[in-house]
Amino acid sequence: MQKLLPVTLFFLSLFTSPFVQAEIKDQAAVDKFINKMVEQHQFDRVELVTLFQSVEIKPKIIAAMTRPAEGMPWYKYRKIFMRDSRIQGGVEFWQANKDSLTIMQQRYGIPEEIIVAIIGVETLYGERTGGHRVIDALATLGFDYPKRSTFFLSELEQFLLLCREEHMNPLEPVGSYAGAMGMPQFMPSSYRNFAADFEGDAKRDIWHNPADAIASVANYFARHHWKAGNDIAFPVTATGDQYQQALTRGLKPDINAAQLKALQVHLPEQINDDELLKLLSFEQENGQDLWVGLENFYVITRYNHSPLYALAVFQLSQAIKQQYVIATNE
């Protein structure tokens, strides 16, 4: 079958990379994956065999997957992000990228502070984008982590397609231990579907170009149905313990305000009785905090499927906005 791109474009500088003996033990799984890429996407078999000889399995990556921060209680998780340095860093990032943030808010309706907070939570405004080769991370989790093998093999497939489309050497991009890339930490599938080119220069550089990263985050939220001008979440209180009936699994709003009121949950007056909400409980050192998430809170969880993550983004965004307003008015 005819290749979609010549070897010199797809594997630019591949054969000048230092050779490392492959550490993937399940060669049958690698062969099956290569067959799929050849048959479904017209990749060159010899090129892929050569590529995987330079891929390394990283046990530390698997260790990191077993202790994600989202497994912490809320009162510990929150402290990671609600730091003065991260808040001030958000103000400075906002000031430095005001024009592109404003344009994205006008175009998509995504609040500037939410975009800033996402990048702040993910990579400290681009300072910590990860140090693992993306292909090593995805191969490690795809071939040596059965619990999530299906997902990460799919992302490995998306990554190779991405490298072909963007003319990148697959051995060069670096990212997180899970294979997330750039300032907004996009997985390969998200990069292919949602990464945006702010300047129109035919490049989607989410590693070094803040404008592209900002546009990509905005596009991601817009495509996941962010509702411009709508609220995100509110802290609430409850009388008695009937509210516990509403603490159900999942993250999508699944109970309306009138039903929550009937369970003695005290809601802000601006929430209409027919508004769908998600009641969430967050563990504190003593007791718990109750919050209701609206549809836009659910959209934030599409970025990372964790209520802890979404609440951290929301609270950080509010703290950054408060300090930004103060700095702007000084």
Image (cartoon, rainbow, N blue to C red):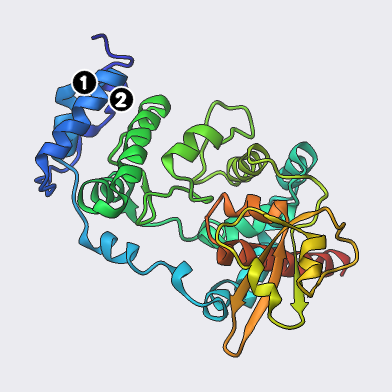
Q: Are marks 2 and 1 in contact (CB under 8 Å)?
A: yes
Q: Nearer the viewer, residue 246 or 73?
A: 246
Residue 184 location, x and y as percent? Answer: 53, 50
223 horizontally vs 132: left or right? right
Residue on which disc 1 sits: 44
Residue 173 location, x and y as percent? Answer: 36, 43
Residue at position x 64%, y 74% in the image: 244
Q: Residue 247, which numbered label?
A: none
Residue at position x 53%, y 55% in the image: 304
Asked if 47 appears above or below 134 in the picture, the reply is above
Element on which disc 2 rests: helix
Quadrant containing the C terminus is bottom right
158 horizontally vs 124: left or right? left
What is the three-letter code of the residue carrying label 1?
Asp
What is the three-letter code of the residue carrying label 2?
Phe
Q: What is the spatial separation of the Cα atoms under label 2 and label 1, in whole angstroms? A: 10 Å
Asked if 58 appears above or below 78 in the picture, the reply is above
189 horizontally vs 294: left or right? left
